[in-house]
Image (cartoon, grey):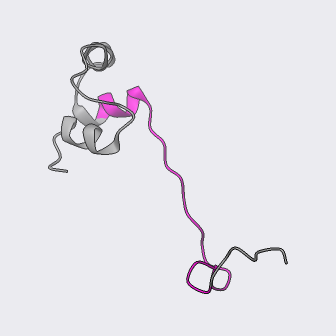
Amino acid sequence: MKNDNWTSETAPKGKGRGVTKYFYTQIDIALCAGKALQTIRNDIAREVFDPNSLGSVCRYCGGST
């Protein structure tokens, strides 16, 4: 059977929209934080925040997450 590892709880229901994947660049972070691109690069090098962690980026940009 093709999808025998799926249970009724994990199987997709109808057509649905699916999951949208988002991405951001250092330029996006700079715009959000209101800082220059080089400042963002310096802060990444100094490990002020982790650009691979959305929560870290949100905190860096001034969010409370």
Instruction: Identify which residue, 2 or 28, lies in the foreground.
Output: 2
Instruction: Identify which residue, 14 or 32, lies in the foreground.
Output: 14
Residue 28 screen position, x and y as percent:
38, 34
Q: Residue at x 28, y 45 (%)?
A: 55
Q: Residue at x 60, y 68 (%)?
A: 18
Q: Residue at x 28, y 38 (%)?
A: 57
Instruction: Identify which residue, 35 or 15, lies in the foreground.
Output: 15
Say how many tags the image has.
0
Residue furthest out toward the right = 1
Asked if residue 30 is among those painted magenta in the image, a careful observer would answer yes
Answer with left or right where residue 45 lies relative to residue 20. left
Answer with left or right where residue 41 lies relative to residue 19. left
Asked if residue 27 is among those painted magenta in the image, a careful observer would answer yes
Seen in the picture, residue 19 relative to 54 is either above or below; the reply is below
- Give the magenta-colored segment's residue range: 8-31
- The quarter holding residue 33 reads top left
Residue 5 screen position, x and y as percent:
70, 73
Q: Residue at x 64, y 80 (%)?
A: 11
Looking at the magenta stretch, what is its main secondary structure?
A: loop
Residue 29 screen position, x and y as percent:
33, 32
- The quarter holding residue 17 reads bottom right
Q: Quadrant of the N terminus?
A: bottom right
Answer with left or right where residue 9 lies relative to residue 35. right
